[in-house]
Amino acid sequence: MNGPGPLGTFLQARRTRLRPEDVGLRDLGPRRRVAGLRREEVAGLAGVSVSYYARLEQGLSRGASAEVLDAIARALHLDDHEREHLERLAAAARHVPRARRPRPEKLADGTRDLLRALDGVPALVLGRRTDVLAWNPLGHALLAGHLDFLAPDDPARRPNMSRMLFLDPHGQELYADWKRKVRTVVGNLRLAVGRHPQDPLLAQLIGELTMSSPQFLALWRDHRVAPCGVASYELRHPVVGTLTVTQQTLSIAPSPDQTLIVCTTPAGSASERALALLAQASGTRPPRPGGPGAPRPDAAARETTARTAGSAPGRGR
């Protein structure tokens, strides 16, 4: 193994995040040259030898038991998501399968039917690398109306939500609190890497973002892990202006690596009215009780929405 590997770098990052006073230690030693706890301090808190813990961080030991991992997790004050991530990284270090290029992700018919049934509610389905596998017309108009609606149908042209947020000016300008949004996305990508450490396409995406975005690199080096859940965001949409949506990330039982993202607005709010206006502008229908699934916007409507989005002034970053 060359270098510390994912397990070692994660342990190093979590160790440097803590101060002696955070774990009940008094800093009576020589002046610290780097932030965070020393290796010997973590080893002492976890009840393991300094040399053993050092080998874990250096990627020289792959056999950490569940008891040792639990002790290290307590010493580093890891939360539940970070503990699960640590266990996945340790398991991956013990078993290193031969990397294979994965097959393109597919959308199950039932999932596509569910997406079509969400009439008047912006929704999309993301794969395990945050590729957009499908979106309904209003989800497309809300989050990426400047892109081809049919692009997710072709694996070679699929938009990627992480790439859009970091490298596409539209994605950067859409979220008023862009930094909060991308912190969540990077934390979720960390979990994906822990679950699929041998996915070459996922590694390729991380490499591209690391080389192309200093903001991504800074967040990635922090090694924070967190799943996407429920969060409200203020959007500055180029067609209908400012609105606030609650994005809910839902798991899809038959396809555990895929997630359904649904955007809702409070009933009777200005944001709901803005969403209805966007539905009209993009050629889809606003919410209607008992109404059938919204049709795909025709080519003329997509072109009009994209042209309008392209002519809107940007905030810059």
Image (cartoon, rainbow, N blue to C red):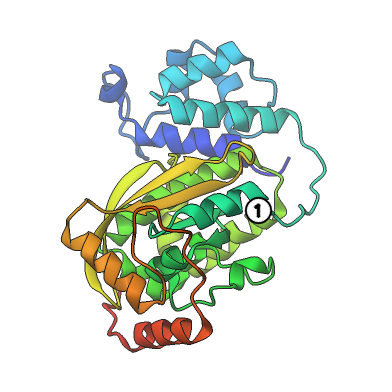
Q: Considering depth in this image, is 194 or 139 the residue closer to the camera?
A: 139
Is 167 on the left or on the right of 272, as rendered? Answer: right
Quadrant of the rendering where the C terminus is positioned: bottom left
Residue at figure coordinates x 29%, y 81% from the top left = 314
Residue 145 point in image, percent of width and height: 43, 75
Residue 6 point in image, percent of width and height: 60, 40
Residue at figure coordinates x 36%, y 69% from the top left = 172
Residue 4 in sight here: no
Residue at figure coordinates x 29%, y 67% from the top left = 276
Quadrant of the rendering where the N terminus is positioned: top right
Residue 180 point in image, percent of width and height: 31, 53
Q: Quadrant of residue 37?
A: top left
Secondary element at tag 1:
loop
Kind of residue indicated by mark 1: Leu
Q: Considering depth in this image, is 85 or 267 the residue closer to the camera?
A: 267
Q: Quadrant of residue 228?
A: top left
Residue 167 point in image, percent of width and height: 46, 71
Residue found at the very far front of the displayed protein: 290
Residue 121 in sight here: yes
- Kindly identify which residue carries mark 1: 107
Residue at figure coordinates x 30%, y 33% from the top left = 31
Q: Residues within 10 Å of mark 1 (few under 14, many from 20)?
A: some
Is 288 on the left or on the right of 114, as rendered? Answer: left
